[in-house]
Image (cartoon, coloured by chain):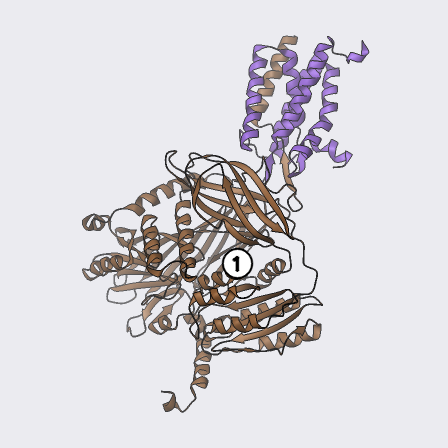
């Protein structure tokens, strides 16, 4: 075809990328999907309402939307949206006319077969699939896809889905993202589907934030004028964004900033409905350690992805790099590499940080254009080779991590990074990005990575990253729990802990009781121990969702081990499938088939998810009316005495009952005296 | 902590509700104690006003700012209970000890008190106050008079 057009392939690719950029708003969005060959009008989204509750370290997102079929024939509706970070999709409910359908997670191929049979028989059915970490036929990479059949002619179908995800606080700032913008990382899917991101009527996002710690400010970047913020108490906010029409092409990003100078702390959520059965916990440790800034000059090597899949994110990338350069101080140096099919250096060796140099290279980065493929390995290797051993150096890798050129095996990245003693800090751009590869790169090198949305406060993200890179870190950090038997934990071997970083450990425990929890680490060469003691409850019923989040953390750990070559692919598949079915999670190997109750009974599919959902909804109802709870567990023996500039407020209070007691005693004394 | 902060922390509160119940208890206990033994009451308050914030600083170092009358309430409560020595007083005393023990072991308030967002209960203030009240009551009782021992 290139010969026919008489244009070289490279030039043609550039033209294609330019066209893709022009089409970006339509292509890169969540929305209903229609085959590119279809002649029907696309299924419409009538309304799209998102209800989010952020409560003590995790978020519950419930999305309710109505599809409308404007055609004169019954159709199948297909809806795709990016997989949110560490999200466990747990519920799908469909209202099709009078019928209510609910979802059960089973093995993916079996789910697809069941759905196809029901659909072909003309029965109401739906299917929720995920290409969570692996490419899958007809499902966009790193996306969830829902298929609903039939949407009857000129009729509506309502769908509701729910997912949970843990949220961490970074340097006192919490961030929640409802991802909508597609990353544009899956060319095959983009060429198969056309997308309809338009919401015909109501688009609304309602966020309820319940924090056990006072919140100074909440913010929705890009929608400040539209959102209504209702502050109920210091830690309880309701934020609403309500539009008459909308489109699903931009992420919804919500920030909340805790009051400054809160103490370091340990917080525990547990779920153990039966004293005789193991429980599940989520332990969040916020180190209150004064990590001093590094004052000596340092080197920074930028490795920037300018491949085709970065087309819609290049503006964000350029803006981010420009603002990062502006943050550097005299004495620092930088070099810039870019990569697509292969890597090359923009600068010629290290450049000293001066106002002139920063201005010049800012301009050069802003002029970058995209090229074709993505050879992350080549780019990373070029950056690593550029490091000079006698100065502290950090590599700043900015990419969506979609490798499709050169060496693509994650194990090779693992081996490459082990040869160098350089920290790689990753900025993972957009949704549908390859988090397993970026996490592998960051963890192997002892760095960290941050996922960045196009709708993020980029400067905020950069400042957070900068405070980590420019400050001392805790090394060889390890969290130990003694006194209570814990198992199947994730995240207890931490490695480095950066400034402001929160540690989240999921695990299971056999019996409740008092536990000694210790964080051992090295700080500027000295061994440091931060210890506390608190109770793991024998019975706790408030947070049943913890089981699903623990299972997802296990799955992510298995994926990481598979990528690093520590677990065989078939073994990983087996483990993920078992966890997915047992804890009712949609994964690469498990899908949610949505049927009417009688159809489940007829097919003999167990209602495991229904049982879980019933328990979760009961707990959520009980929590809904309660004020925000502070779940700090190290009050009696603070894990970080002194903390970083602690400003914890304390009070001795006579509650009404005690005051009444005092009153009775006073009256009794008065009468005796009389 | 400066001298001014040491003294004034008792009279500052985090919320209206926090102030209301503390002040009610302070008024009731203060009148009852003063009516029985003014000198012992003043001695208790004069000692507790310093001991409580110092105890909070020493035993609850994570608390940077302490506020509330309840430490002084506890001191007066203990003073009254030891002085009165009736069955009702004993029951009230046991209930009060149980409340403090619960707060100490769980780190949470036994009954919901709206001290304000992010304000943590500091049971050590109640314990310190109760100890001061008990010691003062015992000393005055041993001296056989409401006056300071030295006056005999």
**Residue B142 in view in this figure:** yes
When the figure is inspected, residue A435 is found, relative to residue A674, above or below; the finding is below
Q: How many marks?
A: 1
The answer, for residue A630, to whether it is visible in the render is no
Q: Position of residue B87 (x, y in %)?
A: 56, 10
* Element at label 1: loop
Q: Which chain is purple?
A: B
Give whichever of B95, A621 is nearer the camera: B95
Image quadrant in which you'd find residue A264: top right
Which residue is situated farthest in the right direction here? B151
**Front position in the image: A475 or A534:** A475
Residue A235, image quadrant: top right
Q: Could you tell me which quadrant the N terminus of chain A lies in?
A: bottom left
Output the chain of dot 1: A
Q: Which residue is identified by label 1?
A: A226
- On screen, A641 above or below A496? above
**Residue at the location (37% across, 35% down)?**
A274
Q: Position of residue A463 (x, y in %)?
A: 61, 60
Task: Sort mark 1 into few (<14), some (14-19) or many (20+) by Cα contacts within 10 Å.
Answer: few
Q: Which chain is brown?
A: A
Q: Position of residue A188 (x, y in %)?
A: 36, 72
Left or right of residue A91: residue A324: right
> Is residue A585 rendered to the left or right of residue A627?
left
Front residue of A554 and A30: A554
Residue closer to the observer: A127 or A156? A127
Rendered-image quadrant of the C terminus of chain A: top right
Q: Is residue A293 left or right of residue A245?
A: right
Residue B122 percent across, percent down from the top left: 61, 32
At x 60%, y 16%, the residue is: A665
Q: Quadrant of residue A154?
A: bottom left
Please tell me whether residue A220 is drawn above or below residue A303 in the rendered image: above
Residue farthest front in this picture: A419
């Amino acid at each position: 075809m290139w010969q026919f057009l008489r244009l070289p392939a490279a030039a043609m690719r550039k033209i294609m990328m330019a066209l893709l950029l022009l089409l970006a708003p339509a292509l890169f969005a969540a929305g209903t999907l229609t085959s590119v060959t279809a002649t029907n009008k696309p299924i419409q989204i009538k309304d799209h309402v998102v209800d989010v509750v952020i409560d003590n370290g995790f978020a519950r997102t419930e999305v309710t939307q109505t599809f409308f079929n404007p055609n004169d024939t019954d159709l199948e509706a297909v809806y795709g949206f990016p997989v949110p970070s560490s999200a466990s999709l747990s519920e799908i409910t469909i209202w099709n006319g009078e019928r209510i359908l609910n979802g059960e997670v089973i093995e993916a191929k079996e789910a697809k077969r069941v759905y196809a049979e029901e659909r072909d028989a003309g029965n109401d059915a739906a299917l929720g699939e995920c290409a969570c970490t692996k490419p899958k036929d007809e499902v966009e990479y790193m996306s969830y896809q829902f298929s609903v059949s039939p949407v009857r002619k000129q009729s509506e179908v309502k769908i509701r889905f729910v997912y949970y995800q843990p949220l961490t606080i970074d340097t006192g700032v919490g961030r929640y993202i409802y991802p909508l913008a597609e990353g544009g990382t899956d060319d095959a899917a983009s060429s198969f589907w056309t997308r309809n991101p338009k919401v015909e009527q109501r688009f609304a996002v309602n966020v309820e934030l319940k924090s056990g710690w006072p919140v100074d400010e909440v913010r929705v970047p890009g929608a400040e004028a539209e959102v209504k913020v209702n502050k109920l108490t210091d830690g309880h906010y309701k934020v609403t964004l309500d539009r008459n029409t909308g489109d699903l092409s931009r992420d919804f990003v919500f920030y909340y900033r805790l009051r400054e100078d809160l103490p370091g702390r340990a917080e525990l959520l547990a779920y153990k409905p039966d004293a005789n059965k193991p429980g599940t916990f989520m332990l969040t440790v916020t180190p209150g350690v004064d990590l001093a800034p590094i004052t000596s000059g340092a080197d920074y090597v930028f490795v920037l992805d300018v491949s085709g899949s970065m087309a819609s994110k290049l503006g964000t990338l350029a803006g981010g790099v420009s603002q990062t350069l502006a943050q550097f101080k005299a004495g620092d140096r930088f070099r810039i590499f870019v990569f697509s099919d292969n890597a090359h250096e923009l600068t010629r060796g290290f450049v000293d940080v001066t106002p002139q140099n920063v201005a010049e290279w800012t301009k050069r980065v802003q002029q970058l254009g995209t090229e074709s493929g993505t050879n992350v390995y080549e780019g990373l290797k070029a950056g690593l080779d550029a490091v000079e051993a006698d100065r502290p150096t950090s590599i700043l890798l900015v990419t969506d991590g979609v490798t499709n050129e050169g060496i693509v095996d994650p194990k090779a990245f693992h081996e490459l990074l082990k040869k160098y003693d350089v920290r790689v800090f990753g900025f993972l751009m957009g949704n549908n990005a390859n988090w397993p590869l970026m996490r592998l790169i960051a963890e192997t090198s002892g760095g960290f990575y941050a996922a960045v949305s196009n709708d993020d406060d980029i400067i905020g993200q950069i400042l957070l990253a900068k405070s980590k890179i420019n400050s001392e870190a805790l090394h060889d950090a390890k969290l130990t729990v003694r006194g209570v038997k814990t198992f199947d934990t994730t995240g207890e071997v931490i490695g480095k802990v950066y400034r402001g970083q929160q540690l989240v450990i999921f695990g299971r425990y056999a019996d409740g009781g008092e536990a000694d929890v210790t964080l051992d680490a090295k700080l500027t060469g000295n061994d440091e121990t931060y210890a506390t003691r608190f109770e793991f409850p024998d019975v706790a019923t408030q947070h049943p969702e913890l089981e699903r989040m623990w299972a997802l953390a296990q799955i992510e750990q298995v994926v990481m081990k598979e990528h690093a070559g520590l677990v065989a692919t078939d073994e990983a598949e087996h483990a993920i499938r078992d966890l997915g079915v047992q804890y009712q999670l949609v994964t690469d190997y498990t899908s949610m088939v949505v049927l009417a109750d009688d159809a489940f009974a007829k097919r003999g599919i167990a209602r495991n998810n229904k049982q879980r959902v019933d328990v979760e909804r009961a707990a959520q109802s009980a929590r809904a009316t309660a004020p925000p709870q502070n779940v700090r567990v190290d009050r009696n023996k603070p894990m970080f005495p002194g903390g970083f500039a602690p400003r914890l407020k304390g009070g001795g209070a006579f509650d009404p009952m005690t005051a009444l007691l005092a009153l009775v005693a006073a009256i009794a004394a008065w009468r005796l005296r009389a | 902590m400066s001298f001014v902060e040491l003294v004034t922390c008792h009279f500052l509160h985090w919320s209206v509700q926090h102030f209301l119940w503390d002040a009610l208890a302070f008024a009731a206990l203060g009148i009852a104690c003063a009516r029985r033994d003014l000198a012992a009451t003043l001695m208790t308050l004069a000692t507790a006003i310093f001991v409580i914030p110092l105890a909070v600083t020493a035993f609850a170092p994570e608390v940077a700012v302490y506020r509330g009358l309840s430490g002084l309430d506890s001191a007066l409560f203990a003073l009254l209970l030891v002085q009165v020595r009736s069955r009702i007083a004993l029951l009230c005393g046991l209930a009060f000890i149980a409340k403090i023990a619960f707060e100490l072991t769980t780190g949470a308030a036994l009954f919901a008190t709206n001290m304000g967002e992010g304000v943590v209960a500091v049971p050590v203030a109640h314990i310190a106050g109760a100890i001061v009240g008990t010691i003062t009551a015992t000393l005055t009782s041993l001296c056989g008079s409401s006056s300071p021992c030295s006056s005999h």
